Amino acid sequence: MKSVKNGYLLSCEVVHKIRGRIRIKSKSLKYLGSLKSEIEKQLEQVRYIQSVKISSVTGTIVIYFDDVTVTEDNLINLLQNTLNIYLVEIYKNEKIESNKNIVIERKLQEESPEEIIKRITAAGSLLVYNFFKKSAEVSIFGIKNFLNLNTFAILSLASPVLKNGIECLIKNKRPNADTLSSSAIISSLLLGKEKTALTIMIMEEFAELLTVYTMKKTRGAIKDMLSVGENYVWKEISPNNIKKVPIEEIKKGDRIVVQTGEKISVDGIIVKGEAYIDQSSITGEYMPVTKKTGENVFAGTIIKNGNITIEAEKVGDDRTVSRIIKLVEDANFNKAEIQNYADNFSAQLIPLNFLLGLIVYGATKNIQKAMSMLVIDYSCGIRLSTAAAFSAAINTAAKNGILIKGSNYIEGLSKADTIIFDKTGTITEGKPSVQTIKVLDKNMSEDEMLTFAAAAEETSSHPLAAAILNEMKERGLEIPEHEENKIIVARGIETKVVDSIIRVGSKKYMEENNISTDICYDEIKVILGRGEILIYVAKDNNLIGLIGVTDPPRENIKKAINRLRNQGIDEVVLLTGDLEQQAYTIASRMSIDTYESELLPEDKAKNILALQSSGSNVIMIGDGINDAPALSYADIGIALGSTRTDVAMEAADITITKDDPLLVPEVMALSKKTIKTIKENFAMAIGINSFALVLGATVLPPIYSSVIHNMSTILVVGNSLKLLKYKLKNY
């Protein structure tokens, strides 16, 4: 008897039931971690439950109960309601567990093309030498001929492969592709077949060269996209003496001088001067900001006006930009499920080659035919072509201003069926302007009310704050002196001007501070009816004004949504902290399926988890400020365009640096093309190598078997490299 309730993560199945005892299975029970005891205690407090025992290994719970009227549906609902309280923690544990990968292959990202080319050149020279060398007679499984300088030279060149093959056998208690190659190389040398051994090495090295070359190009593309771009800086030697030095020579504590038009090359603190700085490359703020002595600045930002002296706090790999680059370079550890499958599938097939070798030898008594079973394997082509495909896709994305942190996110994009948008700065341009100003205090002018609002919003990076500040500047007004601003996330901001408390924010923020909005019901209705975003301004406990702001939709956003539907997206959702009226207006204009309004950041995360628990694969697109939790919890988090921040680049899995929403469906198309290419490579590698195994067991000598096998590897790697030339539409 089975019963299944709710979606994917909280799904429950009754596996066994007798009077007073039931065993229920749920995937979520495997990921309770330290919560296990707490949940057991909670359930045992229910009046009709006698005892509870959860097994995290099997993902089951055994419940003993004394009320015979209790149904299995009652017990399942009780369990799900209890687990739902801890859904965020359960999902986090699941994500952590699913990302645990054992790396048993050589880390090709640590190799350099130059090193591989040297090994290929040396092996090629030895191969030419062995073609002209007089072959020795081999009467036994040739230990005698194994001990010579020629053989030692070959073994030296093959040392990376031999070392990894042996280490994997010892540490992981299982062979890998290098174990198989090592066996084939050593067997060839023992048989006096130096040319066979060298051919195996050269062909495999060439295939790896293509893969490593792709990885290097990818790292270069990422660095170019995020590069600080300054090779030399002006270092302060003494108060009146500066010297131009390479950026590599700058150490923590050194002082550098940066002038108008120059790019800052270190993270540090201003010790002298003042400057107007464009921080959009790091913080996403499209408006330059004024930085004074004592304030922090970041590498990669540009001085629009002014001269400053900076004391370096973070240099080299410690800089914000460098950390982001390192994060992506290490993304090989964030392997896609299909990549893990390729690695595991390959590893499982390797013992088959040894078994086939024994079978062929037992049937033919021919050691060379048995050797052919060792030089032909599926793993090399599958493993290398999969790594090359993902690396090439990440490279292509980087060249188009799209930063992808790992191959798992490419596969995740290809599987996504639900996409969630933030509103301000994501669906809309994020560059709003003031449309309406309504003063409610008869003793106050528009300009005065506006300066009060600007005082509260001065330090905010929110696009709505920028709209108020821009309006004030256009009117030639100055911000009055005020105390430090206090931000209430997703609500508003308050500050103190003279002796009055100024609050600027949402209607909910006003209500939470006992400020009535009833006095202007009609005005509010009119402003909201025009689809404007409404900002409330209060002085002390009185509402003094309303500011209506328009934030038009991004160019091409509706077209992007339509293309996403064509890419397989079934549901488009809007989650916003704005009022219901604004959410409804934009959702209607964009033909969005569902929307939720007036949400806190944690509310967005809960909505995402609810969708995931029902089996949806979710993409979240946001600006990375209030959306950081949602970006983290989504299957794929995307930070889009000029609204990206350093927070976004840390929280998001993919960052699109160009201000064009059409790149979202384009990167999804790239992901689908990548997965299709990998599946093609699987079919080609298995088909060609299976055919070669048959030939190797019957008619082909090992050297020709090696050529067929390695040519197939080069073929599938080459097929992956076509992704380097993949063209994103309109780019």
Image (cartoon, helix red, strand yellow):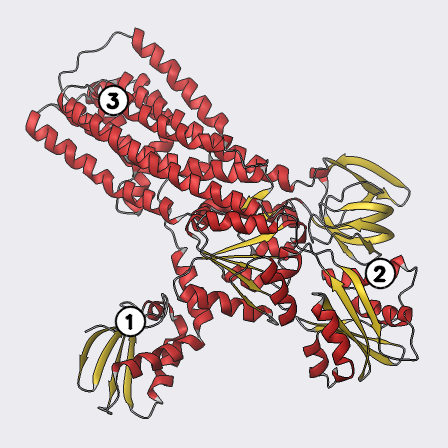
Coordinates of residue 681 in the picture (x, y in percent): 34, 34
Residue 703's place in the image compared with 468, above or below, is: above
User: Tag 1's secondary structure?
Assistant: loop
Mark 2 residue type: Glu
How far apart, in angstroms, are the residues tagged by discs 2 and 1? Answer: 57 Å
715 over 303 or under it: above or below = above
Return the disc, 2 or 3, that comes first in the chain's sequence: 3
Q: Secondary structure at mark 3?
A: helix
Q: Earlier in the sequence, mark 3 or mark 1?
A: 1
Q: Residue at point 39% right, 70% down?
A: 33
Q: Name the element at disc 2.
A: helix
Specify the quadrant that holds the N terminus: bottom left
Disc 2 to disc 3, how far (Cα)?
Answer: 80 Å
Of the residues shown, which amino acid type is indicated by label 1? Val
Place residue 52 in its image quadrant: bottom left
The label on residue 189 is 3
The image position of residue 331, as x and y in percent, is: 49, 46
Residue at horizontal 39 percent and vertical 36 percent from the top: 677
**Viewed as shown, does residue 439 lie left or right of 33?**
right
Instruction: Identify residue for label 1.
Output: 4
Location of mark 2 (residue)? 471
Q: Mark 3–mark 1 contact, CB under 8 Å?
A: no
Give the mark, 2 or 1, whose residue is nearer the N terminus. Answer: 1
In this view of the protein, can residue 336 be seen by the observer? yes
Q: Residues within 10 Å of mark 3 (few under 14, many from 20)?
A: many
- As measured in the structure, the alpha-carbon distance from the residue carrying label 3 to the one carrying label 1 is 60 Å
Residue type, numbered disc 3:
Leu
Between 191 and 299, which is closer to the camera in this rendering? Answer: 299
Frontmost of labels 3 and 1 is 1
